[in-house]
Amino acid sequence: MKMYKLAIAGGGSTYTPGIVRSLMDRLEDLPLSEIRFYDIDGERQSKVAVAAKAVIAEYTDSIKITETTDPETAFEDADFVFAQMRVGKYAMRELDEKIPLSHNVVGQETCGPGGLAYGLRTIFPMVELIDDVEKYAKESCWIVNYSNPASIVAEGVRKLRPNAKVINICDMPVATMRNMAGILGVEREDLVVDYFGLNHFGWFTKVEVDGEDRLPELREHISKWGLLTEDISKIDYRHADSSWIKTFKNIKPIMDFFPDYIPNPYLQYYLLPDYIVENSNKEHTRANEVMEGREKSLFETIRKFEETGILDDAFHVGVHGIFIVDVTVSIAQNLAKRYLVMVENNGTIPNLPADAMIEVPALITNKGPVPEYVGEIPYFHKAMIEQQLASEKILVEAITEGSYEKALQAFTLNKTIPSAIVAKKVLDDLIEANKEYWPTLE
Ligand code: NAD
Ligand code: LMR
């Protein structure tokens, strides 16, 4: 039986123990001989590794575990690398959210100026990771990437390392499907969906169960309650946080306006930006909610485990952990399973640029994702996508060319920003905050 060596880059992530539990639940499908935890913050990583190792110990003692800050040790001979880096960690996420809000612009980690800022921090570290993996890992090694902002990361990788074996994935479409399934009273795996867009910027155009169109029923439900199951316990811990409950409720006003398709929940930031800003607390954003919630409870669980040997079941696997392992199993076993992932367009949506990194259904094989033909999309969605795409593509040009003007164009084009005047103010404040991370923009 083939045994795989897997490295987790961003081993200190709050998601690591949950992902590890998901890996352990699937050892029959993805037998592992080694797991390497790799992070640039050795201290954070060794803390989180305490929990990850305790999870592994519940299942097996035959997996070699390594914790390292050295890329060679992490990636040598690896078969798979999971990437989940948060460049600048929560301290910078907080600024990505609060600086735009201080200018009355959406403050979010992946959408709007916060996402552009996070993108400017992440592209080069991602390229460095790809280069390290290419240098040390097996030629067949795939990087399965969750690192956000995934759309900008995907475009940066396409442009700077076009041949890299990276598959960019996101848990939002599967989380949205989890809610749909809960509403319809079926399993998520029973849903057959069509979807098109960019990451955090797309629409479900078909939802079927056993060949039956269930979109009408979902529309009816959403028109009353948004994309929430009446029983919230069906939603995993992260998405049960109050900000996520609001987000799923906001699907209602969006679909009251545009009932055809079910929007990705992140579209609230582009379609309802004024409403989102009015209802944001400028002093307390999602970064604070996570630091006071998921991050704090992880470190408390670890402290308790170290003191008592009792491991609270705080590492819910959730769709996040399940999905990355599903995708990896499909690559490893060449199952060609159909999942929503990011791919280069190349005619999948003929009325969008061929070099757009789109999110669509694709068959996941050992040669990578094979997208399913989508066809032409309506003008409204095409126009929105093209504006966002231009913002993201110009941002990548800004960082590769070190161009301030292009960065300003990218900010100005972003639909969450009302004018070039505001774009400049937000950009200048973010430049100041990101001195340590961004290349000089001139
Ligand atoms: P976290 O801050 O808890 O963990 C991220 C880790 O990355 C930290 O330990 C940090 O030290 C490390 N890191 C930073 N730069 C690095 C580098 N250059 N090389 C290696 N490690 C590095 O963050 P989190 O909230 O657990 O999120 C992890 C990642 O997953 C983030 O990128 C987040 O945006 C992303 N995420 C993606 C999805 C999705 O569906 N795409 C969903 C949730 C989170
Ligand atoms: C996170 O998990 O922190 C994010 O990446 C998404 C969210 O829940 O805000």
Image (cartoon, rainbow, N blue to C red):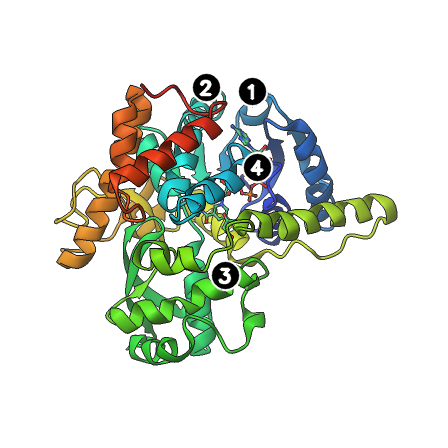
Q: Earlier in the sequence, mark 2 or mark 1?
A: 1
Q: Which residue is mark 2?
A: 135
Beta carbon at label 4 within 8 Å of ligand 1: no
Residue placed at 75% from the left, 50% from the top? 301
Residue 227's place in the image compared with 297, above or below, is: below
At label 3, the amino acid type is Trp
- Count of numbered badges drawn on the protein: 4
Q: Looking at the image, do the residues carrying marks 2 and 1 touch, with CB atoms under 8 Å apart?
A: yes
Residue 5 seen: no
Q: Is residue 113 left or right of residue 387?
A: right
Q: Looking at the image, do the residues carrying marks 1 and 3 touch, with CB atoms under 8 Å apart?
A: no
Q: Position of residue 193 (x, y in %)?
A: 32, 64
Q: Position of residue 131 (x, y in %)?
A: 43, 22
Q: Is residue 346 left or right of residue 363?
A: left
Q: Which residue is mark 3?
A: 244
Q: Earlier in the sequence, mark 4 or mark 1?
A: 1
Q: Which residue is mark 4?
A: 91
Looking at the rendering, which quadrant does residue 121 occupy? top left
Beta carbon at label 3 within 8 Å of ligand 2: yes
Q: CA distance from mark 3 to mark 4?
A: 21 Å
Q: Earlier in the sequence, mark 1 or mark 3?
A: 1
Q: CA distance from mark 2 to mark 1?
A: 8 Å
At label 4, the amino acid type is Ala
Q: CA distance from mark 4 to mark 2?
A: 31 Å
Residue placed at 30% from the left, 45% from the top? 417
Which is more foreground, mark 2 or mark 3?
3
Which is more foreground, mark 4 or mark 2?
4
Q: Which residue is mark 1?
A: 72
Task: Name the foreground residue: 376 vs 434.
Answer: 434
